[in-house]
Amino acid sequence: MTYVEITATLFGVMFIILLTKRNVWSWVAGNVSVALQAWSFYDSHLYADMILQGIYFVMGAYGFYLWRKHGDEESFTILFLTPKQKTLLALTGIVCALIIASTLHQFTDAAKPFADSTLAVASIIATYLQVKKYMENWPLWIVLNTSYTLLYATRGLWLYSALSVIFGIFAITGWIEWKRYNANSNLTENYT
């Protein structure tokens, strides 16, 4: 356990707490966390996860911009995916994960190329859903954080494994909070 891991974990916890409260500053805390995590994952040979942190950083900047542009947590509009959107995201995710996993397996010394790639691609999808305020981000994060807990444990990244447990708990909390908010507002939109 290093100071980088400890600092990344603290900012990660701050990120998820603020996100469940629909606070725009969650994205800033998240970006500090992912920048530090990228460094750790490089050292652990989890290259897809390292690259994922860079994508998280870009998505975090976009999330901050988008949430800031469209107002504070009081004007928060929760969206829901259509069955067609769910199918398209799932198929795209499977194809991308297979391509990345095969590439990592063949050309790098990646520790867990298939698990790492699958979780990385699914995390990109979940982050996109978060940024765009889709309710479905939360159940996806619950599954992902459970899986990440196990992956990080296999690499001896115990603090990140614990952080994934915390993220999983907060994903449940976020899902409940957003459902409660949605039930108490008339701001919900369904896209078709």
Image (cartoon, helix red, strand yellow):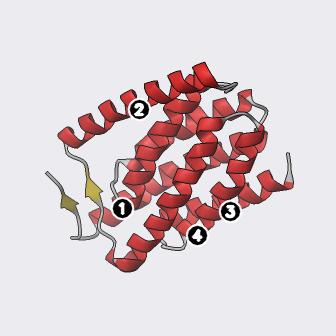
Q: Position of residue 15 (x, y in %)?
A: 59, 63
Give the CA separation, mark 2 to mark 1. Answer: 34 Å
Q: Residues within 10 Å of mark 4 (few under 14, many from 20)?
A: some
Mark 3 vs mark 2: give the one in front: 2
Mark 4 or 2: the one toward you: 2
Mark closer to the chain start, 1 or 3: 3
Residue 122 higher or lower than 78, as above or below:
above
Q: Which amino acid, mark 2?
A: Cys
Marks 1 and 4, Cα distance to the nearest angstrom? Answer: 25 Å
> Which label's residue is closer to the chain start, 4 or 2?
4
Q: Nearer the viewer, mark 2 or mark 1?
A: 2
| Label drawn at residue 11 | 3
Residue identified by numbered label 1 = 180
Which element is circle 2 on? helix
The kind of residue tagged 4 is Val
Give the alpha-carbon distance from disc 4 to disc 2, as whole Å. 28 Å
Classify 10 Å Cα crowding around label 1: few (below 14), some (14-19), many (20 and above): few
Q: Badge 2 is on which residue?
A: 96
| Residue matched to label 4 | 28
Q: In this picture, is 24 found above or below 141?
A: below
Residue at (46%, 38%) from the top-left corner? 121
Whichever of callouts 2 and 1 sits on the residue coming sooner in the sequence is 2
Circle 2 residues within 10 Å: few <14, some 14–19, many ≥20: some
Distance from the alpha carbon under mark 1 to that under mark 3: 26 Å
The mark that comes first in sequence, 3 or 2, is: 3
